[in-house]
Image: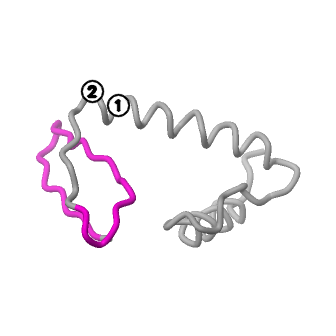
Amino acid sequence: MTAEFKVAEGESAVFAMDEVGSDAVPRPCSGEEAEELLAATVAFWRSQLSASRRQRQPKIQASWPWTADIVTAWHRISALPHAP
């Protein structure tokens, strides 16, 4: 997966990632839909992180395409020192 965004200072770019098959054509995503997807994603991760606090491991389906990347990021973030 790759993406490139060129924005000037003060500008923003809206995007959403979606799992598609090799024969599927990516579809456009409106700014409103991207905001809704972001809100749902944030809510999902808040619930996962809250449920995972004792486990120190997020609960993610192994079949999800970005599982390995997210688990790696989780371990790196967890290794950061905590604020006093």
Q: Is residue 1 left or right of residue 53?
A: left
Mark 1 residue element: helix
Q: Residues within 10 Å of mark 2 (few under 14, many from 20)?
A: few
User: Three-letter amino acid code at disc 2?
Assistant: Glu
Circle on res. 32: 2
Report the residue marked by disc 1. 35
Q: Considering depth in this image, is 77 or 50 the residue closer to the camera?
A: 50
Quadrant position of the C terminus in the picture: top right
Q: Residue furthest right?
A: 54
Q: Quadrant of residue 37?
A: top left
Residue 52 coordinates in the image, percent (x, y): 79, 49
The alpha-carbon separation of the residues under discs 1 and 2 comes to: 5 Å
Relative to residue 1, is residue 14 depicted above or below?
Answer: above
Q: Is residue 18 left or right of residue 65?
A: left
User: Three-letter amino acid code at disc 1?
Assistant: Glu
Marks 1 and 2 close (CB-CB < 8 Å): yes
Residue numbers of the magenta segment = 2-24
Quadrant position of the N terminus in the picture: bottom left
Question: Total of numbered circles in the picture?
Answer: 2
Mark 2 residue element: helix
Task: Please tell me which residue is depicted at 65% across the width and 60% down the height of the picture.
Answer: 61
Residue 81 coordinates in the image, percent (x, y): 72, 58
Relative to residue 4, is residue 46 depicted above or below?
Answer: above
Decide whether the magenta segment is chiefly helix, strand or loop: loop
